Amino acid sequence: MSGRTEYERAVRGLWEALYETENTDDVPKEVRNPIGFRLERARRLAALSSVLSARLPTASFLYLAAEGTDGIARFLASRAWREREREPGESFPPLASSARSFATYLTEKGWDQGRPGWQWELARAELDLHYGELTPSVEASGIGVRPAVGTRLRVSPYDTVDYARRVALKKAQMPWEQVLDTVRPVARATAQLVPGGGTGAGRTLILRDAEASALAWLVEQERVPTAEPSGALLDRLVRVGAFTREAAG
């Protein structure tokens, strides 16, 4: 602590008390209240958990059900949270920057050894839907098809929509860690597609089985076996504004 000004020590002490160690030794004595800081810290952790659950329900559930309060505290102490890009006028807990930094944190942190691979697969699929960049596959580029600007997509070997629905129901009936232990995803190729423009702009489309494999064929991905889309499906994807197609000739 040597070399820091009184102000710097106070700011650092407040940060540690609220987000890191709960230690209030360096909090200015005029406002030092260990019980009050513990309560405020708990309130802030709960508020942030709620924000993450609203934006990234599956990824946050899988992380928090396994990691608990300590997990959200580690996220708050992480470089991803501290160095997140703030937005003008944001107040705690900020929704957009919190979710983005949580996605970065999970990606950089990876998944703990010993955790089932399906958990990371489901979490990663949700992160892709919100923050992933879509690149047309070589095959799609060869026929002049590419994702429209703003289109979002996640393709998973599991039925992500069904899993999220069943988890939401069970969370109201039992503790999260029990839900994590009892609810398993169904193995079924599933795609969630949000067109970036056209008549379907912003509306989520759910495609499964062969249609999900066709979407996987159109973009670079390594999760789902691919199958070339039919002409009718390509026409539909272009019509709703999810993909664009170069004019022939």
Image: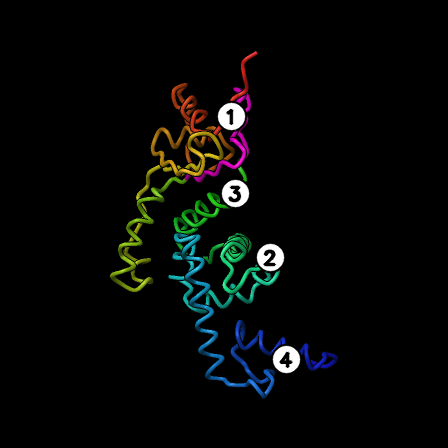
Q: Position of residue 151 (x, y in %)?
A: 49, 36
Residue drawn 33% across the image and 62% down it:
176
User: Which residue type does callout 3 highlight?
Assistant: Gly
Under circle 3, the secondary element is loop
Determine crowd level at label 3: few under 14, some 14-19, many 20+ residues with C-alpha closer than 10 A. some
Circle 4 — which element?
helix
Residue kind at label 2, given as amino acid type: Pro
Mark 3 or mark 2: name the one nearer the start of the chain.
2
Mark 2 and mark 4 lie on one chain; the one further toward the N terminus is: 4
Q: Which residue is mark 1?
A: 244
User: Any mark on residue 132, and which?
Assistant: 3
Q: In which quadrant of the rendered view does residue 97 lie?
A: bottom right
Crowd tier of the residue under label 4, counting other residues whose Cα lies within 10 Å: few below 14, some 14–19, many 20 or above: some
**Which of the two discs, 3 and 1, sits closer to the camera?**
1
Residue at 54 percent across and 13 percent down: it is: 248
| Residue that carries the numbered disc 4 in the rendered image | 10
Viewport quadrant of the N terminus: bottom right
